[in-house]
Amino acid sequence: MPAAFYRRKLPHLQRDNKPHFLTFCTYQRWLLPASARDIVLESCLHDDHLKLDVDAVVVMPDHVHMIFAPLINEQAREVFSLAEIMDAIKGASAHKINRLLERMGKVWQTESFDRVLRSSEKLDEKIQYILENPVRKGLVTTWTEYRWLWYRERESPYSPDKPA
């Protein structure tokens, strides 16, 4: 199936049956409190195996990195779009965060940054990047200590414990 394409301010290229590495940031780089990060991680995993197959997620204080492959919407007979997936994650998490913190307003920047991962080697490299992100930022000494990180273990020649 050909690549789907949509444009906001940035172009977004989507490929069927390929993992996508995606980053989205909080509005004005607002720092999410711990309770909000819990909500974001839950929202990122909510549609796992329904609209997307998630490989890895890390919710940092002001941004999120995800790797996932969009799944096929059987009713529409097409792949769920990145726009639909991101709108669901951002919309649900923003609503819940604002309600929890008794606030109003934007939580997320409108745009997200994405790229298609074309090989298993690139996938392993990006998973390693996600796992090490909290360590690089000085939030923990090892990725296993970070509460807002999730990844699916899979067969790989690379170990997540192995430094990049």
Image (cartoon, rainbow, N blue to C red):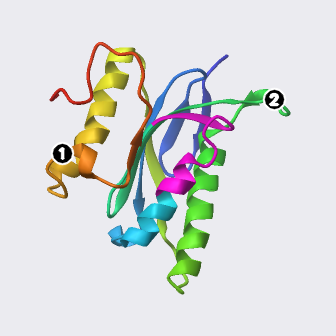
State how far apart marks 1 and 2 are (Cα).
Answer: 40 Å
Q: Position of residue 76 (x, y in %)?
A: 83, 33
Q: Position of residue 19 (x, y in %)?
A: 49, 27
Give the numbered dot on residue 91.
none
Kindly tell me whether residue 128 is visible in this rendering: yes
Tell me, yes or no, whether the two marked residues, 1 and 2, touch with CB atoms within 8 Å: no
- In the image, what residue type sits under mark 1? Thr
Q: Nearer the viewer, residue 4 or 108?
A: 108
Q: Which quadrant holds the N terminus? A: top right
Against 43, residue 122 (above or below) is above
Q: Residue 48 appears in which quarter of the rendering?
A: top right
Q: Which residues are magenta?
A: 41-55
Is residue 63 highlighted in magenta? no
Please state which of the two labelled residues, at mark 1 or mark 2, is closer to the viewer.
Answer: 1
- In the image, what residue type sits under mark 2? Glu
Q: Position of residue 82 (x, y in %)?
A: 59, 41
- The answer to whether residue 69 is left or right of residue 58 is right
- The answer to whether residue 130 is left or right of residue 79 is left
Residue placed under numbered mark 1 in the picture: 142
Residue located at (18% from left, 26% from top): 162
Q: Position of residue 140 (x, y in %)?
A: 18, 54
Q: Which quadrant holds the C terminus? A: top left
Q: Residue furthest top?
A: 157
* Kind of element beneath mark 2: loop
Q: Residue 118 appears in which quarter of the rendering?
A: top left
Residue density around tag 1, few if under 14, some if 14–19, many if 20 or more, within 10 Å: some
Q: Nearer the viewer, residue 9 or 160?
A: 160
Residue density around tag 2, few if under 14, some if 14–19, many if 20 or more, within 10 Å: few
Q: Residue furthest front?
A: 145
How many marks can you see? 2
Is residue 45 highlighted in magenta? yes
Residue placed under numbered mark 2 in the picture: 74
